[in-house]
Amino acid sequence: MEFISPWIHTTEKCNLKCHYCYVRGNRTMQPGIYKVLGEFLLKAPTDKRHLRFAGGEPLLVFGIWESFARSMLKHKGTTVEVLTNLLAVPEKFWKFSELENVNISISIDNGKTVKVLDKNITEKVSRLKNPWIMTTVTKENIERLDVMAAFIGMNNYGWCITTDYFEATMPDWEDLAVQLLDVVEILKEFNYDFTRISFNNCSVKSGFSGCRAGNEMFSVGCGGDIYKCQTLIGKTNKIGSVFDGYKRKSIPVKKECKECSINGLCKGWCPIYYKTPNPVCNVIKLFTNEILKEVQNAK
Amino acid sequence: MPSDCQCSTHVETKIVKEVLNNKEATRRLKRLEEEVAELKQKNASLTRRLRVAKVSKKQIVDDLKKKLSNL
């Protein structure tokens, strides 16, 4: 096992209502579950543990999981990532974010109504060391990606761009292609490091795992049940629990992906919901073609 | 391990290194270029729009910088 990376569903509560969000409910993971989860992770046959604290909005319950995260960080090979909208930040979190092996990923869409790029958020992001920005592209914000690109370029932030898993808010593929290539052109103006960008899990950075849902990557619900993916939490198809463990399953690579020219760079986007052939593959190829040129020119 | 994305983790994988370094990579990247060229050829409106997107972004970027500094 190369690594283990649980998505820890700290809470179902959130201070936003994003139109594409799949999380429902009001539960919060309790300290007893963290204790068992910690024991489970330390027993796993790997020395690389990447813990993803997410939700809902994990900072709403930071006080509940902070001590667990700190105790796990004492074990060699453990890294922590917090996936947050950074809207309500407890004062103690800033100190936590400075710890070695802690990274913060912030959702900013620059949509008209949700996850807006404003002074409040940019000031908070600037307080973090090496933050990573996550943007979900939808019909609502696609025309505003250029502003995001300038923001990313000015700061050389890492940037993970995705479409929503269920394709419910998916822009037309051609519009998406034009906007993404526009983004690349804007980033070029800032001499951006293109190894720091990904689109739907396609990246030219060495070591980008892609999604391994149900295998090294899995999701732990508030009650300790284990699911392949965070989008499945609360549904009937759990694959285990922190009490009993889970059986890893390799995800078969899709036929189209095996034969694809960018297999290896592109990780096939979402192994659960993304169906191939898919016109979004055109967008991924156009995007990859552009950023590969930039990375090779920069060598 | 740096942060990457909610659905990915930074690990060493042989595949990426192979894609970028060996002969097979060169062949596949050539194929990618050909596929992209074919895609553009088949989609005239896309090609037209991409050409517009390729126009220098200097002025746009200057405007965006101003916009962002006024946040």
Image (cartoon, coloured by chain):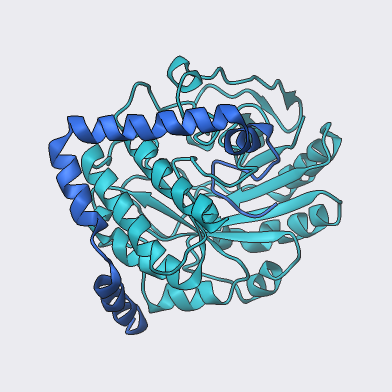
Chain colours: A cyan, B blue
Quadrant in which residue A289 is drawn: top left
Residue A81 lies, in percent from the top left, at 64, 54
User: Is A63 on the left or on the right of B33, as rendered?
Assistant: right
Q: In percent of the image, x 69 and y 54: which residue is there?
A: A80
Which is more toward the observer, B58 or A119? B58
Q: Total of numbered circles in the picture?
A: 0
User: Is A259 on the left or on the right of A1, as rendered?
Assistant: left
Quadrant in which residue A185 is drawn: bottom left
Q: From this viewpoint, is residue A234 visible? A: no
Which is more toward the observer, A113 or B6? B6
Residue B36 lies, in percent from the top left, at 32, 34
Q: In percent of the image, x 69 and y 41: which residue is there?
A: B11
Q: In percent of the image, x 70 and y 74: which residue is there?
A: A95
Which is more toward the observer, A266 or A77? A266
Placement of A21 over or under A192, stated as above or below: above
Placement of A225 over or under B11, stated as above or below: above
Residue A7 lies, in percent from the top left, at 61, 42
Q: From this viewpoint, is residue A282 visible? A: yes
Which is more toward the observer, A243 or A177? A177
Q: Quadrant of the C terminus of chain B?
A: bottom left
Quadrant in which residue A115 is drawn: bottom left
User: Is A221 on the left or on the right of B50, as rendered?
Assistant: right
Q: In percent of the image, x 50 and y 19: which residue is there?
A: A258
Residue A13 lies, in percent from the top left, at 49, 52
Placement of A151 over or under A38, stated as above or below: below
